[in-house]
Image: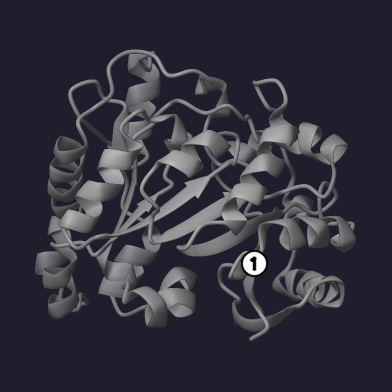
Amino acid sequence: MKLSKEASENLEKGGYRFLGENKHSAVKVCRWTKKSILDEGICYKQKFYEDIHGIKSHRCLQMTPSLPFCDNKCVFCWRDVDLNSPKWEGPPDDPSNILDEAIEAQRSLLSGFKGNPEANKKKWEEAQNPNLAAISLDGEPTLYPKLDELIEECYRRDIVPFLVTNGLHPERLEEIREPAQLYISTVAPDEETYRKICRPLVSRAWEKLNRSLEVMQSLDCTKVLRLTMVKGWNMKDPSGYGKHIEKAEPDFVEPKGYMFVGHSRKRLKMENMPTHKEIKDFGVALEGETAYQMVDESEPSRVVLLSAEN
């Protein structure tokens, strides 16, 4: 499947740069990368996980090998989910080429900062060589047939691979090389809510997600459950989320507020965006249901971090 000319042009206007021979891959500079180069702050990933992985916001490569393949049409997604295809089509892009082109595209997109008097020149120079690949920009990366090779290529280049998945391919999590950090999006406490908010395009999606949570328990990488909270939709039943947490035994849990941005504005309302206080309150509720405690927070991103008790 290839994107239409109009869809491709719209994504490029939004900052995407396509990669690979088959254009199934893309990179986009995260706003926190830019803010870090300007010394205007760092993203919550650096705040939460720098001590574990040595990552820096200004050296983050936000990319995907699987545009536009995804088997959910989540209502909160800032992407145009009408482009989603639940089954891989055509030959996959080469992992080494993806990274080569992603780094070159990122350098090009950041080139203007070289002459910006407000930019931190040391950070700009370091940004030319990313040390984190956030495999999360768009699509579902576990659908990419060469994901194992992409993760290996990241390690070979001393790039820390963070993998974000919707959890619908537990068999892939069992067979691929483990990333440095694995996120599973767990955005519903029950199957009915899951179907409403994730709108899966495949059968047995809830069963597959729960199987992925079981697989997560056996992995040795840093493991995180991402709870994207949408007020009025899934911000309820902390005991239901507690059961997921108990099943997966992650190192961390990230309740994160939905942001009213991108294409999600066509599906949701501003009122669906929880405040940071509401996210913290939900974190407290999760503390009451689990053996996890809040250990950090990032108010600009409306996210808190819960960690397993030592």
Q: How is the image coloured?
A: one colour
> Between residues 178 and 141, which one lies in front from this camera angle?
178
Alpha-carbon neighbours of circle 1 within 10 Å: few (<14), some, or many (≥20)? many
> Between residues 8 and 156, which one lies in front from this camera angle?
156
Q: Is residue 145 left or right of residue 95?
A: right
From the viewer's perspective, is residue 35 above or below residue 140? below
Q: Quadrant of the C terminus?
A: bottom right
> Between residues 58 and 292, which one lies in front from this camera angle?
292
From the viewer's perspective, is residue 112 above or below residue 177? below
Does the rendering let one see residue 16? no
Residue 283: quarter of image = bottom right
Q: Is residue 35 left or right of residue 118?
A: right
Residue at image point 27% right, 17% down = 91
From the viewer's perspective, is residue 173 above or below residue 70? below
Q: Which residue is mark 1?
A: 253
Q: Is residue 130 left or right of residue 70?
A: left
Q: Quadrant of the N terminus?
A: top left
Tell me where residue 282 appears, x and y as whole percent.
80, 69
Q: Amino acid at mark 1?
A: Val
Residue at image point 75% right, 37% down = 197
Tell me where residue 30 appears, x and y as whole percent.
37, 56
Residue at image point 23% right, 53% down = 154
Residue at image point 85% right, 44% down = 190
Q: Secondary structure at mark 1?
A: strand
Does the rendering let one see residue 223? yes
